[in-house]
Image: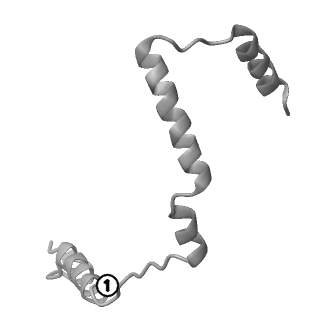
Amino acid sequence: MKINPFGTQGVNPYKRQMNKVDQVSKTAGKATDKVEISATAKEMQEVSQVSQQRQAKIDQLKIQVENGTYKVDPRETAKSMVNFFTKK
């Protein structure tokens, strides 16, 4: 009894897949991406007066922590925590 193969015999499905990948990579290589930043975003990136004041305060607090002179007010901390968790 002879069994004839069903479908195409000499086709390698892996090779077909690789050909598809090659075709996609050739077409994808031609496209380029471009990013533009708006004027508003550029303004937001600049150092503002608020951030300079904030940085000055952070530097001052760092010095106090390093010297051991920074003191935490427990009542103010508790009040802030309660306000944070009771806000909806």
Mark 1 Cα within 10 Å, few/some/many (few <14, many 20+)?
few
Q: Is residue 33 left or right of residue 3?
A: right
How far across and how far down the image is residue 51, in percent? 56, 49
Up-down relation of residue 88 to residue 14 (above or below): above
Q: Residue 17 occupies which quadrant of the picture?
A: bottom left
Q: Is residue 7 left or right of residue 87?
A: left
Tell me which residue sits at (77%, 27%) in the image. Answer: 84
Tell me which residue sits at (30%, 89%) in the image. Answer: 27
Q: Residue 20 occupies which quadrant of the picture?
A: bottom left
How far across and how far down the image is residue 32, in percent? 35, 85
Q: Secondary structure at mark 1?
A: helix
How far across and how far down the image is residue 25, in percent? 26, 82
How far across and how far down the image is residue 81, in percent? 74, 20
Up-down relation of residue 86 to residue 36 (above or below): above
Q: Decide which of 36, 6 is in the foreground and name it.
A: 36
Tell me which residue sits at (17%, 78%) in the image. Answer: 15
Q: Which residue is mark 1?
A: 28
Q: Is residue 60 left or right of residue 14?
A: right
